[in-house]
Amino acid sequence: MALSDEAIARYARHLVLPEIGGPGQQRLLSSKVLLIGAGGIGSPAALYLAAAGVGRLGIVDDDHIDLSNLQRQILHTTDRIGSLKTDSAAEGLRAVNPSVMLDLFPERLDAARASAIIPGYDLVLDGTDNGSTRRLVAQAAQAAGKPLVSAAAIQFSGQLTVFKPYLGRPHPCFSCLHASLPGEENCTTLGVLGAAVGVVGSLAAVEAVKELLGIGDSLSGTLLLYDALDAAMTRIRLPRRKNCPDCGG
């Protein structure tokens, strides 16, 4: 299907990129991404994916907007305090790109729901700060054979990777990085620079677009570390863990 005149105007800066062009934009328009969390990382990621023309976005979040969220969760606004984050996200994303289709899941995922929802999407982006949720999302994405963009931030630092263990060696899984559940410390107790979270969320959107289009160098097998205070990014190798219970090492 040819792009409409409106789509050509909206995505003009993509269309002139040789790595994207018309075929790549068509692929984005037919893509489906599931975002786990509409908070500090999910907000910029969702905004950029909607702006990029990803055709369908699913948003999972059972939380309501609190005043303290607004320092970093840029998808939400003061007048929506008390609203479900999924409803607020829908309002914000439709304002950016009214053609995006949205699936709203105002719920906390358990293993059964993750396994039911994730297969319907091409890619999963997890920006939650709950270790148990991150693990069950990773396991469900692995079982469904879906790439998982996994991002986290705290204080002045963040980390980002892509998990594709269903492809076999050398691609590691979530448990290769986290032999035990990640700690439950979060920005409520430790604090976080809002703009630093925005950097990590934006990087997550970049990696999602790359995976959807099959362009560039995938982060699978490596971990990108961001240090805002030192203005530094470091990429380190992330190997499969020997005898990993989730991917076999």
Image (cartoon, helix red, strand yellow):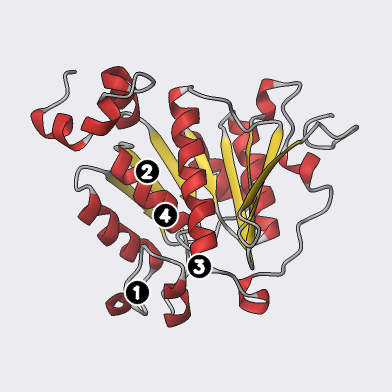
Mark carried by residue 49: 2
Q: Nearer the viewer, mark 1 or mark 3?
A: 3
Q: Please, what secondary structure does the residue beneath circle 4 have?
A: helix
Q: Read off the residue under disc 1.
A: 83
Which of the 4 image quarters holds residue 223? top right
Residue 36 visible in the shown view: no
Q: Read off the residue under disc 3.
A: 194
Q: Nearer the viewer, mark 4 or mark 3?
A: 3
Residue 220 position (above or below residue 67) = above
Which of the 4 image quarters holds residue 65? bottom left
Residue at position x 19%, y 48% from top? 98
Question: At label 3, which amino acid type do we have?
Answer: Gly
Question: At label 2, which amino acid type do we have?
Answer: Leu
Which quarter of the image is occupied by the C terminus? top right
Q: Read off the residue under disc 4.
A: 44
Asked if residue 27 lies left or right of residue 139, the reply is left
Which quarter of the image is occupied by the N terminus? top left
Question: At label 1, which amino acid type do we have?
Answer: Ser
Q: Nearer the viewer, mark 1 or mark 4?
A: 4
Asked if residue 193 lies left or right of residue 233, the reply is left
Q: Residue furthest front?
A: 230
Which of the 4 image quarters holds residue 188? bottom right
Percent across and percent down for residue 227 are 65, 56
3D distance between C-alphas at marks 2 and 1: 22 Å
Residue 213 position (above or below residue 101) = above
